[in-house]
Amino acid sequence: ASPTNTIDPTRESVAALYAAMARRLAVVRGRLRRPLTLAEKVLYGHLDAPETQELDPGRAYLALRPDRVVFQDVLGQSGMLQFMQTGLDRVAVPTTIHCDHLIQARTGAADDLAASLAENGEVYGFLRSAAARYGCGFWEPGAGIIHQVVLETYAFPGQLLIGTDSHTPNGGGLGTCAVGVGGADAVEVIAGLPWELLHPRRIAVHLTGTLNGWAAPKDVILYVAGALSVSGGTNAIIEYIGPGARTISATGKTTIANMGAELGATTSMFPYDDWMARFLAATGRGDLVPVIEQNRDLLVPDPEVEADPETFYDRVVRLDLSALEPHVSGPHTPDLARPISALAAAVADNRDSLVDHLSAALIGSCTNSSYEDMSRAADIAAQARAHGVRAAVPLMVTPGSDTVRATISRDGQLETLQEIGAVALANACGPCIGQWRRADPAAETPNVIATSYNRNFPRRNDGRATTMNIIASPEIVTAFALAGKLSFNPLTDTLEGEDGTPFRLAPPQPAPDVPSQGFLSGTRRCVMPPADGREVVVAIDPASGRLQRLDPWPAWDGADFSDMPVLLKARGKTTTDHISPAGPWLNLRGHLDRFSDNMFMGAVNAFTGETGRGRNVLTGETDAVSAIARAYKAQGLRWVVIGDANYGEGSSREHAALSPRLLGGVAVIARSFARIHETNLKKQGLLALTFETPEDYERIGADDRISLAGLRDLAPGRAVTCVVRHGDGTQETMALRHTYGAAQLDWFRAGSALNTMSRRRAA
Ligand code: SF4
């Protein structure tokens, strides 16, 4: 079968989407009878059942029909492996896979890409073949970072897109409602199921004025992060409205939307405007613009909303762009934001362990490598070059895509940056996600780097806790690189030219938002799938150490579970990262068995206070929790985990449910659950149960055995009987609660949510 492109948006598909949105919105407007925000229009326009859907922000779960799914290469592995369990031949919505996270930064673009192709060839081969087999687009290594590629190719106003990466909201700069999700959610949507989302609350950032001088879109989001904090956007969609929003380019909006993830926001969005039309046209999608214009009312908030935001949003932040000073944030958290005029004093006081000397500077990434960004950074570099000044510390540039790289190579920005010493890295995540193999000995002691990236948690960049990351706009980071120190304020301080004459950098000239000659498309692109992929063989070597085919989980056999040991009683905060750590395990995401050796590595054992270790009740020996689970499984012994309050908070990492399922777990019994993890456990066929009396948590001992009775009668709202046989021989009965609906109970009985769907399909 010849390749087919059913993946790119077309005039017809966009028009059909808007027509469907309008139909659904008419139903919802009839119910609510009030003006709607932009996020409400897009979400309600994608409801699975607009007539009956509960619409209570912060409480109801919306069943939505996303238009598109994107996977990065790490979660793309487990995503496609799970999709293969369904037995379906083709994904249900346009889907693409992007090879960006696995590429390591060492010396420079060409060598790093070649090394990555050699190191990850097996994984790329699998992703390429799985994409062809199941009808997905495959963006090959070097083509770019997922979010930049989505922006250049797939994002458009009013679309609902989900992606397996937390910075998926990047697409909000083009008016897409783009949400980062866990792999399980993405798999269900490509399998044709609706997607559940906690109805987001509504936050508005009302912008007036115009950015000027050194101030850049990055400073808007750094300011907002400081104002709202890293949790201020949790379960909310942030809309940027007001006349100031219409002064920011589409890619500037994108930087702001991207970093909404730092506030915990579900996503961030901008209303449609002429900047978006210009960017769509410059990236080869001008044919969509007339359709978009005809449907403008769907793609902006209702006029009453913008006129009186305090009435229609749960919270409003107001910001005058004209008065905004450049900001820097960090170290260690993106909401530690300061105006640049306050940084030198913070460094002098050694506040937050800041040291003056910079060890490296990095610009670009999915967050800040637009044509405008690179032009403004190059403007600063050109001024330095004119005075014979080069970067005082290593300066690296990460283009967001091959399109960006090719275009800034043609137009000279990259060369200008290279002339002051910059090194171009591959069009990939690299130092933004800990994939920076940094040879510099400076990294081994406490050191500060400046980046225009988005996250600055310890270990985020070079994997070392000793490296602190200060985040700023690309032009400010370039200025820092020239000075080699953090206390340098380019707005007021001078540099020394090669002739010894001091000079001050002028603010970067306003830069074009899109290149006057248009974007170059680069050499690395999307590989389209064949029209019929059924003949394609998906490449998985049974002996592989990186990939493992997943078999469907066995269905429940209908019997109660008796006398199960407590594998772990977790105490205190138990996030999905404690249950299923990431970091060095990244490379094993496609091999569930090997990956599961990390299970519960970060969880605190309530019986001993140790982390990640427990006692095998069969042998009495102490071991890693995952090793004990394997030992029980080898003996055919099922087990339970006891959890504390809000068990499973944090990211939606589905491996935190997949690993317990693989290693023989039956149930997690907790004081309470974080909702997403609770659902993930249910989807994998595990029982997620809570103590009816939370204090019963204290009554579970290390040598207790747990029986769950009456499971045949399991029904929505009906308690489960738990019989606890204590180590001293006494016995007691506890009532356990659950939140399973009727359909979710089918997941448990069938073995998993995907099994339920496969069965339904086969029936
Ligand atoms: Fe995530 Fe950084 Fe890659 Fe962007 S560049 S997708 S933020 S890891």
Image (cartoon, helix red, strand yellow):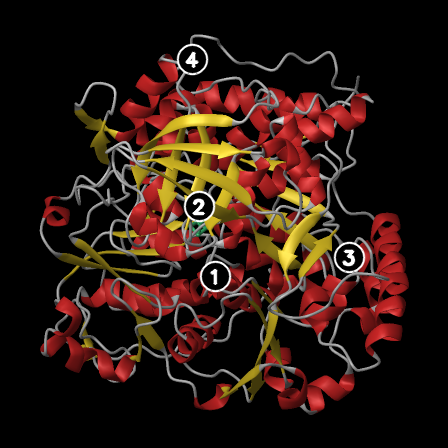
Q: Quadrant location of the N terminus?
A: top right
The reply to whether the residue tagged 4 has its Cβ within 8 angstroms of ligand 1 is: no
**Circle 2 or circle 1, nearest the eye:** 2
**Image quadrant in which you'd find residue 140:** top right
Measured as percent of width and height from the top left, residue 101 is found at 43, 39
**Circle 3 or circle 2, nearest the eye:** 2
Measured as percent of width and height from the top left, residue 641 is found at 38, 38
Q: Is residue 486 visible?
A: yes
Q: CA distance from mark 3 to mark 1?
A: 22 Å
Q: Residue at x 62, y 89 (%)?
A: 310
User: Which numbered disc, 4 or 3, marks the residue that appears first in the sequence?
Assistant: 3
**Mark identifier at residue 46:** 3
User: Which numbered disc, 4 or 1, marks the residue that appears first in the sequence?
Assistant: 1
**Mark identifier at residue 261:** 1
Q: Which residue is mark 4?
A: 544
- Give the amino acid at mark 1: Ala
Q: Residue at x 52, y 53 (%)?
A: 675
Is label 3 in contact with label 2 (beta carbons under 8 Å)?
no
User: Which numbered disc, 3 or 2, marks the residue that appears first in the sequence?
Assistant: 3
Q: Secondary structure at mark 3?
A: loop
